[in-house]
Amino acid sequence: MTGRHTLAASHVGVAVAAFGVASAMGAMLALSVADIQFPHRSESLYYIALTAHGVLMALVFTTFFIMGLGYALAQESLGRITGRGAAWFAFWLGVAGSVAAAVTILRGQSTVLYTFYPPLQAHPLFYIGATLLVVASWIWGGVMLASYRSWRRENPGVPVPLSIHGMLAAVILWYLATAGLAVEVVGMLIPWSLGLVGKVDPLLARIFFWWFGHPLVYFWLIPAYVLWYTVLPRVAGGKLFSDRLARMVFILLLLLSTPVGFHHQFADPGISAGWKLAHTVTTYAVLFPSFVTAFTVIASLEVAGRMKGAKGLFNWIGRLPWGDPFFASVALAMIAFVFGGFGGAINAAYAMNAMVHNTAWIQGHFHVTLGTTVALTFTGATYWLLPRLLGRELRFRGLARLQPYLWFLGMAFFSTSYHIAGLRGLPRRVFSASLNGEATTPWRTLTLVGAVGGVILFLSALSFLAVVLATWLSGQRIAAPAFEFAVPLRPATSLGLWDRFGLWTVLAVLLVAAAYAYPVFSLLAHPRYGSPGFRPF
Ligand code: HEM
Ligand SMILES: [Cu+2]
């Protein structure tokens, strides 16, 4: 392994392992919902697997991958990782926390799903393990900031490389988001699970959870966008359409993605309609940077196609490297995001939300966004990263080429059928779609199609694992290829408005305060009764 990238590679390795275990559980869930029998199928196994799948995918896979990507980019774009010792400490802390949480889930002591809403109560080690993972990510953020400051001292007055600009936005956003999570978990859930306090206020806990839960989405998306802006145009053989627009996007995401959490709580009592509407408006505002991203990235790809000689209106699309595993993964991830965006706009609309709330539609929705746009970008990026991190040639290239298409196909079956089943009223998080009733017949075929999709997705995940494992263990040793980033059509040469991180951080904090201060204080002013903990089994 190339020494200076061991840290990044180790993080990617943990991410891949979490993804592998969670994928097997995903397939099991899809079979179970469709009422297909398999050995040991039971309600309790379903909820254990559902919790493990959600936690390992949404929290462990993503966080470890992003930390690894951050270290790789700091090493390459800044030429340093300042605080390697702390970074290794954080790595082991994050691993220990994730393992502790996973063990209590698999032992059936923490069947609280990845949202861990009280009054469902988990084993204290579940909350403590999750906290350790978050603390690890805070240390990662500190190392990223220290590396940046050290670089800045040597490079005054020039814009930081775009990839790091994006990662810094992600780090600041993460501190802002996890502040809410820390209040919930450390202030409320850990003392309650240890028996130090008898009752917990579920509504207050949910508010702090979604304070964290929505920016979490952008904590995943910003690193994905970093890859779209800084690596994809290069792999496609073109140039980045606009450096300035990309910087603006990262800052707008930092500002707008936290004050929106109530769009997950339209059905919750205790929050007034006016505040829910305010968060709806900011939700639509945060769509804007994603539209700009779609425009900029597609324009960059058009530049690539034209540089290869395409002349017609659309034939540049055919000139793109669809057989390259990284390119295909990211391009399909972007296509999936079109559907994710449509669905998201529906979810965020106050009235239409009532139709899809807590139905299978939601699972359909976030498997195209998180489960494809983000996951496929990260798995695709793993193909790009591995030779650079390990100094080994990718093994099973054919399989790597096929894998993103297989994922897209599986997801087309899975997500489409879950979207439709949700509109027909199938609740999310159910062990069986038949619910022993005849009224459920319209769900049977749809969930069967979903199960077919789940199996295809699992095969795709297995292909990915095979490529990664074979490359890691037996890929031919090569001189590690350089990290080549996309060159902008017009590079930014002087510091601009979007480079003023201090200013934007202050504004981001003020926006969060404006979005949450009044609703939280008015809730605290009411008499509150709280709930003891419950465990389903
Ligand atoms: C092998 C591919 C996958 C399959 C077959 C799959 C399947 C499923 C199924 C069937 C459910 C439960 C639906 C329900 O009954 O409510 C589910 C939930 C979930 N999945 Fe996946 N999934 C896959 C990949 C992913 C990926 C890549 C991610 C994210 C990176 C992800 C994140 C989640 C989350 C967060 C939940 C929600 C858990 C909860 O409701 O508490 N899944 N998945
Ligand atoms: Cu959200």
Image (tube, rainbow, N blue to C red):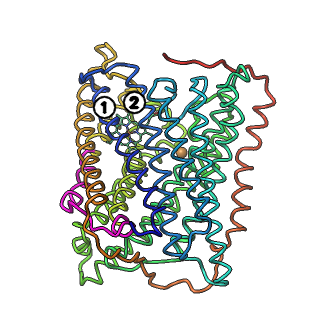
Of 263 and 475, nearer the camera is 475
Label 1 to label 2, Cα distance in Å? 8 Å
Magenta region includes residue 51 = no
**Position of residue 309 in the picture relative to residue 277 (left or right):** left
- Give amino acid for label 2: Ala
Residue identifier under label 2:
49
Q: Classify mark 2: residues with Cα within 10 Å, few (<14), some (14-19) or many (20+).
A: many
Give the quadrant of ligand 2: top right
- Give amino acid for label 1: Met
Residue at 30% from the left image edge and 20% from the top image edge: 40
The x, y position of residue 122, in whole percent, is 56, 26
Q: What span is colored magenta in the figure?
A: 385-410
Residue identifier under label 1:
28
Q: Against 132, is 330 above or below?
A: below
Picture quadrant of residue 41 = top left
In terms of secondary structure, where does tag 2 sit?
helix
